[in-house]
Amino acid sequence: MSYNLLKGKKGIIFGALNEQSLAWQTALKAHEEGAEIVLSNAPIALRMGEINKLAEAINAPVIGADVTSMDDINNLLDKSIEHFGGKIDFILHSVGMSVNIRKGNPYTNLNHEFEMKTLDISAVSFHKVLQAAYEKDALNEWASVVALTYIAAQRVFPDYNEMADAKSLLESIARSFGYHYGIKKKVRVNTISQSPTRTTAGSGVKGFDGFINFSEAMSPLGNAPAEAFAEYCVALFSDLTRYVTMQNLYHDGGYSATGVTQQVIDKMA
Ligand SMILES: NC(=O)c1ccc[n+]([C@@H]2O[C@H](COP(=O)([O-])OP(=O)(O)OC[C@H]3O[C@@H](n4cnc5c(N)ncnc54)[C@H](O)[C@@H]3O)[C@@H](O)[C@H]2O)c1
């Protein structure tokens, strides 16, 4: 069911790789709610071609950008403004990648060059997008910018590895840039801390099956699925949440506030 919550709004969605992607589901939902969208992903992801199915379904152009490149981001913003014939109302940063996890390096034996790359792709890129938008004055007043994070920024999940540090930085950037952009233009910047979800990035974490089942058992409402994430994200893009900014918002079925559940106690007893 559509409420036209994003009617007349224009946004950029980063990170739709395949149907499982949190960004993919969000693009579908935002379109259903009346938004016009530009899709973006890394050139290598575009070569896989999946994104074209989504682009067709929601009638959106695809503009490649490696989020670590300021040139790519500037080009994406310029072309999006040209395409929309005006400024931008929302951005979803749904990008993450850990080189050390890919290479199987444990947290206690990181390759620090890889780590810098991970931090650049997964966290500093958010600053790059915000800074490019800020400098160009690419966003409308009350625009909403959202990035995706995980509770490993607050608590230890051993196999989440260097991504925990990347997410801490990402959340800090949301707070700090949210301050400056709020004052300059009433732009909102938030992170959503999502339940474990079966996606390409999610499943890359070692022991993901145990991880996601544990989280399910520890969440009074169960893990939040991707479709529900998309709905929450649309609410944050909409005018109904105009005074929410600089927050890390848990979308996790109550996991973050739960010490233990009876289900887990029964398993341990
Ligand atoms: N899946 C989960 O369990 C979960 C939980 C909490 C937060 N998140 C976060 O959600 C976000 C989206 O991940 P997802 O789970 O939908 O997986 P996904 O693999 O579908 O999405 C990750 C995206 O990042 C893109 N990307 C990687 N390097 C890039 C680069 N250099 N430039 C541009 N794009 C690049 C990939 O192409 C891909 O589209 C990530 O930030 C992830 O950490 C995921």
Image (spheres, grey):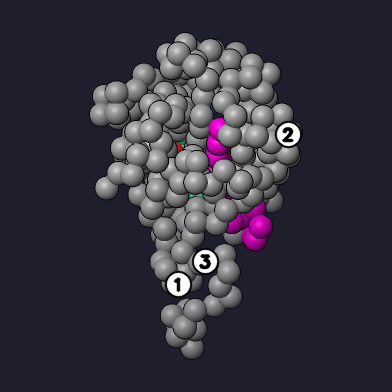
| Residue at the spot 57% in from the left edge and 43% down from the top edge | 242
Badge 1, how many Cα within 10 Å: few under 14, some, many 20+?
some
Find residue 220 and name its label. Answer: 1
Residue 66: in magenta span: no
| Residue at the spot 56% in from the left edge and 72% down from the top edge | 258
Question: Viewer-proximal residue, 37 or 169?
Answer: 37
How far across and down, in percent of the image, does residue 174 sit?
A: 66, 40
**Left or right: 246 in relation to 222:** right
Q: Earlier in the sequence, mark 2 or mark 1?
A: 2
Badge 3, how many Cα within 10 Å: few under 14, some, many 20+?
many
The stretch of residues the image draws in magenta is 143-156
Give the residue pinned by disc 2. Answer: 183
Question: Viewer-proximal residue, 253 or 51?
Answer: 253
Query: Could you give the CA–CA distance between mark 2 and mark 3, rounded to whole angstroms?
Result: 33 Å
In the displayed structure, would residue 253 be above or below residue 167?
Answer: below
In the rendered structure, which amino acid carries the disc numbered 3?
Tyr
Mark closer to the observer (2, 1): 2
Is there CB contact under 8 Å for labels 1 and 3? no
Q: Earlier in the sequence, mark 2 or mark 3?
A: 2
Find residue 255 and name its label. Answer: 3
